[in-house]
Amino acid sequence: MIFPGYDLNSTEPIVKEIFAALNHLDVNIDGEDISITISVGVSMISKKDTEPNDFYTRVDSNLYRSKRNGRMRITVA
């Protein structure tokens, strides 16, 4: 998700609320209950970003850092 007009600190409560709402949410698919968990990577567009991919690469890296460190985490950098 992208939050235009928000800085990193402003997104923190929103990200935490989404994180809490989705983790351990049970969803029924074709009669089978599936417990959802998420890992999250968060970042802010920087003046150092020369290409749009710079931002997405950083967010993706943060996401995989969350997964490597035990999943169900939020990594901000």
Image: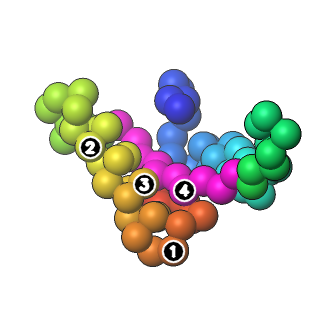
- Please state which of the two labelled residues, at mark 2 or mark 4, is closer to the viewer: 4
Instruction: Write the residue at 37% across / 46% down.
Output: 59
The magenta stretch spans residue 53: no
SS assignment at label 4: loop
For the point 30% across and 48% down, the residue is 58
Tell me the amino acid under the disc marked 3: Leu
- The amino acid pointed to by label 4 is Ser
Residue with the mark numbered 3: 63
Tell me which segment is drawn in magenta: 36-45
How far is the residue under mark 3 from the one under mark 1? 11 Å
Q: Are the two marked residues, 3 and 4, in contact with CB atoms closer than 8 angstroms?
A: yes
According to the picture, the residue beneath numbered tag 1 turns out to be 70
Looking at the rendered structure, the secondary structure element under dot 2 is helix
Position in image of residue 50 (x %, y %): 14, 32
* CA gap, disc 3 and disc 4: 6 Å
Measured as percent of width and height from the top left, residue 62 is found at 38, 56
- Lower position in the chain sequence, tag 1 or tag 2: 2
The x and y percentages for residue 4 are 51, 25
- Separation (CA) of disc 1 from disc 4: 9 Å
- Residue 13 visible, this orientation: no
Please identify the residue farthest to the left as the structure is shown.
50
Q: Which mark is residue 25?
A: none
Query: Within 10 angstroms of label 1, few (less than 14), some, or many (20 or more) residues?
Result: few
What distance separates the C-alpha of mark 2 from that of mark 3?
10 Å
Amino acid type, mark 1 = Gly
Q: Which residue was labeled with disc 4?
A: 39
Residue 36 placement, left or right of 66? right
Outermost residue toward the bottom in this view = 69
Residue at mark 2: 57
- Element under disc 3: helix
Residue at position x 70%, y 51% in the image? 36
Question: In the rendered structure, which amino acid carries the disc numbered 2?
Answer: Thr
